[in-house]
Amino acid sequence: MLNISQLESSLWEAADQLRANSKLNANEYSMPVLGLIFLRHATNRFNAVKAEIEKGLSSRGGKKRPITIDDFKGKSAIFLPVEAQYDRILNLAENADIGKAINAAMKAIEDETKMLEGVLPKEYTSFEQDLLYNLVRIFDREELRTATGDVFGRIYEYFLNKFAMSGAQEGGEFFTPPSLVRTIVNMIEPDRGNVLDPACGSAGMFVQTGHFVENRGEDAAAKITFYGQEKSDTNTRLARMNLAVHGLEGIIRQGNTFYDRWEELLGQCDFVMSNPPFNVDGVSPEKVKTDSRLFTEKKIPGIAAKTKAVSNANYLWIQYFYSYLNERGRAGFVMASSASDAGHGEKEIREELIATQAVDMIISIGTNFFYTKSLPCTLWFFDKGKPAERQDKVLMIDARNVYRVVTRKIRDFSEEQLQNITAIAWLYRGQQERYLGLVGDYLNKTHQEAGTIAGVLTQLESPLVKLTQMLQTFSDSLGASLPLLKDLPEVEGLVAEDIANQNIETFRATLSELEAGIQEFTAARVGLIGELQVHLAWFASQAESLSTNEAQKECAARFAQFIPQLKTLQKHINEVHKLASRAVELAEKKLEARKQDVWDGKEVKKQRDALDILRDEAIFAIKSTLYVKAQVTWLQSRFPEAVFVDVSGLCKVVTRDEITQQDSSLTPGRYVGVTALDGEDEEDFEERMREIHLELASLNEEAVELAASIAANFEELTIIG
C-alpha cells in the first residue's frame, strides 16, 4: 500500500536538496518544480485514458484509427502531443538540451488546452542540465509512474505548502493553510452551482471543494462551476495548474477585485469562499464609490487623511462577498481579527450586515496558522437562507485554544479537531444525526484500535523473555567477580576488582528490577486483555444499535473503565523496555560482555531491535485507542444530550440584541467567556513538553545565527578599522 505521506516528504527532501546545491533561490525554483509535477501527472492521466479509449476504437482493415484530441473530451485528462509526454523527456539523448525540451513540452500542452494557455512555466533553460535531469528522475519513481487516484493532487498541494513555508512565491500569500480552507468548506458545504473566490490564490478553496463533493460520491466537475479572480499573474497560473492537476475545470481570470467587478455573478453565486489580503490601505475611493457591490449605506469604511485612500479595505471585501451571493447563498472567508471589533465607519457597515440577518457563524482562530504571519485571524460565515428559527442568531466559536503544534512557528487542526468544530455547527443547525454519526465513528475506531492491543502485547513478550534469559545466563556465568577486568587502573582508591564487583552488583540489581517489572507487566497485560476481550465481544453485539445518544454514552462509560488500566500498562511497557536496554548496556559497556563466549552479541542485538519495534507498536496501539476515545469524551462532556448548548470558553449562540449590547462586536471571546481548565493528563504534559522542545530548538538555531551575524559584523569592523 502506498504511503503517500512518506512519498511526499521523500520527494520534497530530494528536490529541495537539489535546489540547495544549485544557484537558484526558492522563488526561481518553485514554479518549474510544480510544472514537472503537473507534467508527470498529465502523462499518467493521458496514458490511463488512452488505454481506455483504445479499447473502444473501431478498426478498419485490422488497424485502429489514430487517437485524436476529441477522444479526450470529457475524460478528465489532457491530450498530450508526443513531445509533451514525460517518458519522451526522460529518455532524451544524452547530449540533448533538456531545458528546451521541457519548455517545448509545456508550450505544446498550452496549444492543446485553452484553460492552460500562457500558464505553464517555461523557464527551464535557466536550470543547470544536471539539475533538470535529476529532477525529472525524481518524479519518475515507480510509485509515481503507477499512481492512481488523487496522489498527484496531494503531492502538488504538499509542494505548494512547503514552498509557502520556505517563503517562495510572494511570501506565501498564494497559499491558504488547508486547516482553514477545510473549516470553511465543512461549514458552508459547497456542493452545487456557482462557487466564487475573488481572491483565489492557488485555488485551494476549489480543490478542497472538489474533495468535499467527491467524498460524497459525486462528480465535482458535473455539479459545480468554479469562478476565480486573482491579481497576481503568478497566482493565476498556479490556480489554473492546481485545478488541472486535480482534474477540475474553472474560469480563472486575472484582475484586481477592488476595481474589476464580475458583473454577471452579482447575486448569482451559491457559494463564496475566500482568503483576501488583510488590512489593505491603498484602494482609491474615487474608483469604488459607485461600486454596486458596496450595498450598505456607508459603503466606504473610511478614508485616510494623509493618503486620501481607503484606510482599510477589509469591509470592502466583506461587502463584496455578501453581494455576490444569491438569495440562499452561503459564504465563508478568512478575515483579520481586528475587523470583528473595528469602530467608526467599519462599525456602521458591520451593524448593517448584522441587520441583514445573514451573519451565521464567527470562529476565532489562534496564532501561527499561516506560514508567513503569526497573527490570529477570524473565519466569518454568511447564510442568506437561514431558517426562521435562526434568523436572529449567530453562532460564536472561540477555537483559539484548539490546535495541533506542527513546529514552533506553525499550528493547524488535526483531523479530529476539525471534525469536532464542524460537529458544533451541526448541532447549532439541529443536525443531531450527523453529530451522533461522528460519535459513532469515534466509538467504532476506538474499539478497532483496542482490538489490536492484545496482538502487539503478545508479540512484545517474546523478545522481552528471550533478552531476559540471555541476560540471566550471562549473570550466572560471572561468578563472584570478573577476571577480565583485573587490569583496570585504580580509581579514587578503588582497585579494579572493586570496580568490577560494583558493576556486577549494579547489573544484577537492574536485572532483578527487570524480572520484577516483567512480572508486573504480565499480570497487568493478562488482566486487561481478558476483560477487554469480553468488552469487545459485547461491543460487536451492540454495534448496530449504537445510533442513539443514550446507547453511545453507555458504550463510552463501559470503555472508560479500561483507560486507567491502559495508561498503567503503558507505563509498565516503557519501564521494562528501559530496564532491558539498561541491562544490555551495563553488560556490554561495564562488564565487557562482548569478550565472553557466553554472550551472543548478534542475537542480543536482534532481540533488542525487535523489542524496540514492538514496544513502539504497543505504545502506538494504546495511545491511538486513548486518543480516539478522548474525542468521544470531548464531545459528550460538552454536549451531553447531543443537542447544542453554550459551552464556556468554546461556543455560544447569541442574539442580535446581545450583539447590540456588546457594541456590535463579532468577536467570539466577548461572548463565550473563559474556558474551565481540564484535568491535566500524561498526554497533555507530553504535548506541552514537545512544544517547549520545539521552541527551545528554534531559539537555539536563532542564537547560532545571531552569534554568526555578530561575529561577521565584528570582522567587518576590524577590516574597516
Image: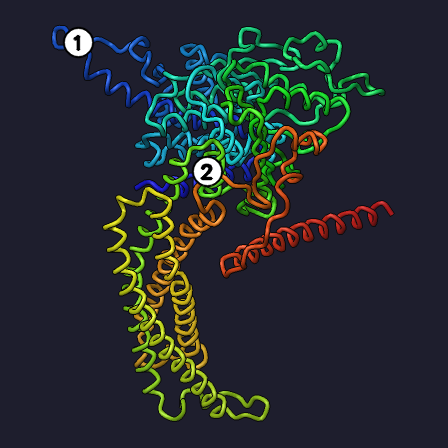
Residue 415 picture location, percent across and down = 45, 41
Q: Is residue 19 above or below residue 603?
A: above
Q: Residue at x 61, y 24 (%)?
A: 276
> x, y percentage for residue 271?
50, 19
Q: Which residue is mark 1?
A: 58
Q: Position of residue 189 (x, y in %)?
A: 45, 26
Q: Is residue 92 visible to us here?
A: no
Given the image, on which type of amino acid does mark 2 rest?
Ala
Q: Which mark is residue 423?
A: 2
Q: Residue at x 72, y 10 (%)?
A: 289
Numbered disc 2: secondary structure: helix
Choose between 552 and 585: the one closer to the eye. 552
Q: From this view, report whether residue 596 is shown above or below residue 155.
A: below
Residue 130 is marked as none
Binning the other alpha carbons within 10 Å of mark 1 as few (below 14), some (14 to 19) or many (20 upward) gives few
Is there CB contact under 8 Å for labels 2 and 1? Answer: no
Q: Is residue 329 visible?
A: yes
Q: Quadrant of residue 98?
A: top left
- Residue 306, picture quadrant: top right
Q: What amino acid type is highlighted by mark number 1?
A: Ser
Q: Which residue occupies 55% across, 24% down?
A: 391
From mark 2 to mark 1, how far is it between C-alphas? 53 Å
User: Could you say where residue 249 lies in the image, as x and y percent from the top left?
Assistant: 42, 16
Residue lying furthest left: 61
Specify the farthest residue to the right: 721
- Which residue is at the front of the view, 662 or 269? 662
- What is the number of callouts on the image? 2
In-front residue for pair 210/592 = 210
Which of the colour schemes (rainbow, by chain, secondary structure, one colour) is used?
Answer: rainbow
